[in-house]
């Protein structure tokens, strides 16, 4: 009844608010060495737009790569030296738009919005001064200059597949013992609940490693998505995420009494949040604040961010320490909750 009556409510809320093709409140960094009237006017128009929020003002161009590696911005707008002088004296000035190409659709949308604002300001100048002026945008896509969509979908699909498969496999493990009547044998044995849970989880952990190797092999050799960073740390982060998914499935297994219910909760209950609230398809920044807060407890969000950094951006592991710590905390929390929820007596 909860699934039949509650799922439509959850679906309409998620599909109504999370799914949007618009990009709003995007974090933007500005590099403005000239700080003249023209650049300030463009910056004011960008800040006034609902699509952008200027969070950082860069002092040096050397900060551009760092701010992208730390995932602190989605777009950098860099003005040329003597922007206003060049524009009014020669009729031309250049501005560089640097976007994170790991999500090519979002990057193209951001570039389009920024280009439109710049073009609007250019038209204003031509009407005011009645002389031809041209602001030339220099577009640069970091990490994915070819704009391949696979660079965005592979990390998301990795998170979706591992989460669903691992959770569904373990969610039916304890429930199967209950339905088959063999749980009594385990409960009267001298085994502690921790050892029962670990024994039920270990075979699926090995199978999940096989799935991980298969996914990485297909991603690199079939979809042509290179591993730009450390393969070792990519595997480590994936194994931690697998532990989170297995622990979550084990928690579900201790709460339900039938395999059908376990499959429904682990399948239908996890698929939509992972697809819609993890940043896999739709940018989290464009969602309502309440959904952004909910996304913090979605393990796939942190795993997808870590995979993008390690696999696509090729950053050192120091830039994914936050994601690693959060995933480890989730795995430990779910394992403890599963132990507390494990019933040593059958009702």
Image (cartoon, rainbow, N blue to C red):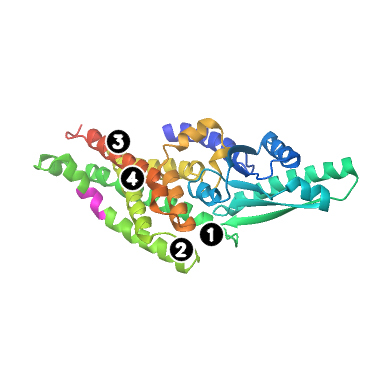
Residue 155 at x, y percent in the picture: 46, 54
State the residue at coordinates (41%, 62%): 216
Q: Nearer the viewer, mark 2 or mark 3?
A: 2
Q: Residues within 10 Å of mark 1 (few under 14, many from 20)?
A: some
User: Can residue 84 be seen in this snapshot?
Assistant: yes
What residue is at 36 percent from the left and 62 percent from the top?
Answer: 213
SS state under label 4: helix
Q: Specify start and end residues of the magenta stretch as a single range.
A: 199-203
Query: Upstream in the sequence, badge 4 or badge 1?
Result: 1
User: Which residue bears the numbered disc 1?
Assistant: 150
> Which residue is disc 2 drawn over?
219
Q: Which mark is residue 332?
A: none
Magenta span includes 202: yes
Crowd rating for badge 4 (residues with CA inside 10 Å; few <14, some 14–19, many 20+): many
Q: In the rendered structure, does residue 178 fall within the stretch colored magenta?
A: no
Q: Which residue is mark 3?
A: 255
Quarter of the image where the N terminus is located = top left
Q: Residues within 10 Å of mark 2 (few under 14, many from 20)?
A: some
Q: Residue at x 75, y 39 (%)?
A: 37
């Amino acid at each position: 009844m909860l699934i039949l009556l509650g799922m439509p409510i959850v679906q309409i809320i998620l599909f109504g608010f999370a799914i949007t093709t618009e990009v709003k409140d995007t974090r933007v960094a500005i590099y403005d060495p000239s700080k003249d009237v023209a650049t300030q006017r463009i910056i004011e128009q960008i800040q006034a737009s609902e699509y952008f929020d200027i969070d950082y003002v860069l002092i040096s161009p050397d900060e551009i790569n760092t701010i992208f590696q730390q995932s602190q911005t989605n777009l950098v707008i860099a003005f040329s030296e003597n922007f206003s002088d060049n524009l009014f004296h020669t009729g031309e000035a250049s501005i560089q738009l640097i976007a994170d190409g790991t999500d090519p659709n979002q990057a193209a949308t951001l570039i389009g919005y920024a280009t439109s604002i710049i073009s609007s300001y250019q038209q204003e100048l031509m009407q005011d001064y009645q002389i031809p002026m041209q602001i030339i945008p220099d577009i640069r896509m970091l990490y994915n200059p070819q704009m391949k969509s696979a660079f965005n979908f592979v990390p998301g699909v990795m998170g979706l597949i591992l989460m669903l498969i691992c959770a569904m496999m373990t969610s039916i493990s304890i429930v199967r013992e209950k339905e088959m009547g063999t749980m009594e044998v385990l409960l009267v044995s001298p085994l502690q609940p921790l050892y029962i849970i670990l024994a039920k989880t270990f075979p699926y952990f090995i199978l999940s490693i096989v799935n991980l190797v298969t996914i990485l092999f297909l991603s690199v050799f079939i979809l042509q998505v290179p591993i730009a960073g450390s393969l070792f740390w990519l595997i480590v982060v994936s194994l931690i995420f697998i532990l989170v998914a297995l622990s979550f499935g084990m928690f579900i297994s201790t709460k339900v009494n039938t395999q059908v219910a376990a499959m429904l909760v682990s399948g239908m209950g996890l698929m939509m949040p992972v697809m819609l609230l993890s940043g896999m398809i739709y940018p989290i920044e464009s969602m309502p604040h309440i959904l952004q807060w909910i996304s913090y407890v979605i393990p796939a969000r942190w795993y997808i961010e870590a995979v993008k950094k390690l696999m696509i951006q090729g950053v050192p592991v120091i830039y994914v320490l936050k994601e690693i710590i959060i995933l480890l905390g989730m795995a430990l929390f779910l394992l403890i909750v599963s132990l507390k929820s494990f019933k040593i007596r059958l009702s």
